[in-house]
Amino acid sequence: MIDFSQFEENLRAVRERMDRACAEAGRDAGAVALLPVTKNHPVDAVDYAQRCGLRAVGENRVQEAADKHSCYDGGVYWELIGHLQSNKAQQAVAIFDRIQSVDSLKLMRRLDRFAGEAGKRLPVLLQCNTGEDPNKYGFASDEMAPVLEAALGMEHLQVDGLMTIAPLDDDSNVAKAAFDRLRGLRDALAEQFGVGLPELSMGMTGDLEIAIAAGSTQIRVGTALYGERDG
Ligand SMILES: *Cc1c(COP(=O)(O)O)cnc(C)c1O
């Protein structure tokens, strides 16, 4: 694990990349939020982010997040960015402030039920596999209209927007196509259903500039902030 001063340096570098990408895209510097991805790092990674005023962190496994969550009395905004098995939905609802990786109707129904039982309205993003990557979770683009319709009918879920992970590919046009498609899908769905869907969670260490150019409102960054992960 890197030390705090290294983290501060990495954070400055990531912010510079974000600012440059926003300027090139003609977007305000504040238009894109940074979600530090603390998965596979010790709880210090969460502390570093908090000390720099980054309140939200991204985790991809329920158990790991639960362990870190137990170190805090509040103040951290926990976001789930990894695939969630239905049998862990209840625990996820208890820990996470938002779930970005909603990728099946079955999971959606369970989250709605457990959020209701917990007496809360759970913010979610719908994960869409716009890159049509067979190795990735997420709804297919052409499923999104009925899926959104179902989600909007769930009393205890609040749909903030959409999330995608671009396929890993040396050709940056592959990521660009996946991000452009998510943006287009969001615009079309927002119009069709008369809702906002303001959040577009897309872009990671390797492709954040491409995502910002395509309209990302939140990039999820691990490696550029914390270095390589062990697991
Ligand atoms: C791990 C992960 C990230 C961060 O990836 P880096 O390349 O390390 O920045 C972003 N999004 C998701 C869904 C992840 O699982």
Image: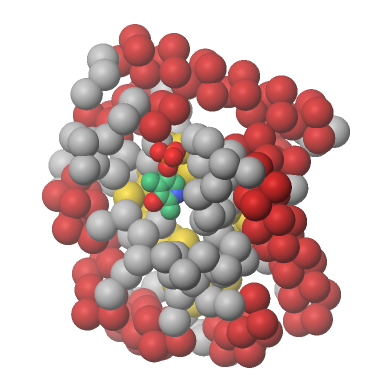
Residue drawn at point x = 22 percent, y = 69 percent: 91
122 relative to 227, above or below = below
Q: Is residue 43 left or right of residue 97?
A: left
Residue drawn at point x = 26 percent, y = 57 percent: 61
Q: Position of residue 77 (x, y in %)?
A: 39, 48
Residue drawn at point x = 32 percent, y = 69 percent: 84
Q: Is residue 117 left or right of residue 200?
A: left
The scheme the figure's colours follow is secondary structure
Q: Is residue 143 left or right of residue 133?
A: right
Q: Is residue 193 left or right of residue 224?
A: right
- Rendered-image quadrant of the N terminus: top left
Q: Is residue 32 visible?
A: no
Q: Position of residue 148 (x, y in %)?
A: 62, 81
| Res 46 quadrant in image | top left
- Rendered-image quadrant of the C terminus: top left
Residue drawn at point x = 35 percent, y = 66 percent: 83
Q: Position of residue 126 (x, y in %)?
A: 54, 70
Q: Nearer the viewer, residue 51 or 36?
A: 36
Count of all numbered marks drawn on residues in the image = 0
| Res 36 quadrant in image | top left
Q: Position of residue 177 (x, y in %)?
A: 71, 56
State ligand 1's quadrant: top left
Q: Is residue 175 visible?
A: yes
153 relative to 218, above or below = below
Q: Nearer the viewer, residue 126 or 230?
A: 230
